[in-house]
Image: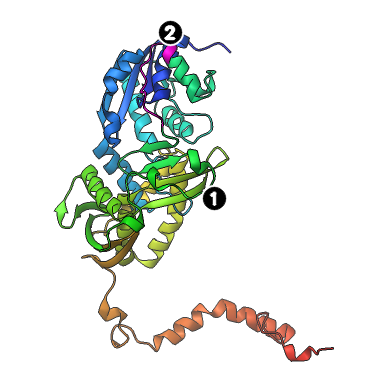
Amino acid sequence: MPKPSVKKVVLAYSGGLDTSVIVPWLRENYGCEVICFCADIGQGEEMSGLEAKAKASGASKLIIKDLRDEFASEYLFPLLQSSAVYERKYLLGTSVARPLIAKYQVVIAQEEDADAVAHGCTGKGNDQVRFELTYNALDPRLKVIVPWREWTIRSRQDALDYARSHNVPVPVTEKSIYSRDRNLWHLSHEGGLLEDPWIEPEESMFQLSVSPENAPDEAQLVTVDFARGIPVAVDGQPYGPAAILEVLNEIGGKHGVGRVDLVENRLVGMKSHGVYETPGGAILYAAHRELEAITLDRDTLHYKDTVAQRFAELVYFGQWFTPLREALQVFFDKTQQNVTGSVRLKLYKGSVTPVGRRSPFSLYREDFATFGQEDVYDQKDAAGFIKLFSLPVKVRAMMDVAGSGQSRYAEPDYSVFKRD
């Protein structure tokens, strides 16, 4: 199949071996100009030296955008408000970041008059879907180039050989056996020893958190303040969107909080084993859950939990820029109108234990809950409530008795059975 004609391509660039090799590969195979784009969403030291590396690989320029606050306020906090968790454990750190990166890739392609975009995702993972769904949602006119589906490179050694033959500078440091993804929200680990889900992860693998065994012997109390479901302060100190995550990551990591070991179902059909470190996110999810417990009515809280599971799937599958995701976000925004207040948590050796919660919109009232205030709740009213609430099961039992003489749930009469 002939390659499409491409004049200029914007590559999602990290500076690692794969994307460094993609730059000359694109020039060689498509004869196009390559612009590298890197989104700063909290990778830390991974951002250093990228411009020189990109240009040495053959890129015409490198564009870096600091998206940390936007990532926190427009992606992570809506995720927090939704309470979405994928497959009971995963707080969606990688999933929620890809639409933001791809969005700005499209923006830059439009600004630079590029006719194509490219990414370095493999054909086995979820990220390829997340990037390309965003491309298609925001500008379907752009051509999409995915080298991993075209080239003959199949191993790290193949990539190193290609880099040397094309004078691409690559770091001489030993590569980690793990594949990692880091941002403000989390650090993920895959591959290496983790390919066997029976093997316990080695402690040297972790980078954001200490092991619970090595965490301080004294618990630490942390108070998080929320306004409409969004965290705004820690221990009374206000912070901006990105800063509050950095502070909580440091505090949570010190106490071994937020480690998750998960075998998950990828969108492409296979299972994978990953380990995630989300110390700040774990604290925020625990705090937000407690604040909702006192500010949301029962029906809203229960229905929100149902919707959150679907929302988690949308985020995991890369369907951020879809009508359903946007519609569900409107629902979550409505539920958060009164989720304002403070939650106090105790961090101790990997655990996050809520020990206090308060809100000016709290639905918990001691005078309503007490057994002694008949002017608020008359206990005799319970008899009528239970009679009506149990009516469906009562009618069914009455029909059973009329037919067989007993309820279908009646215990069998074991006395009729005799031993030989």
Query: At numbered mark 2, what does the secondary structure look like: helix, strand or loop?
Result: loop
x and y, in percent, of residue 44 in the image: 27, 35
Q: Is residue 174 on the magenta stretch?
A: yes
Identify the disc placed on residue 324. none
Query: Is residue 391 covered in magenta?
Result: no
Q: Is residue 398 left or right of residue 83?
A: right
Q: What is the number of the mark on residue 31? A: 2
Q: Quadrant of residue 179?
A: top left
Taking depth in this image into account, of 307 and 250 the one nearest to the observer is 250
In magenta, the rendered stretch is 164-175
**The residue under label 2 is which amino acid type?**
Gly
Is residue 28 shown to the viewer in this render?
yes
Q: Could you tell me if residue 321 is visible in this image?
A: no
Q: Is residue 218 above or below residue 250?
A: below
Q: Is residue 196 left or right of residue 83?
A: right
* In this picture, residue 264 sits left or right of residue 76: right
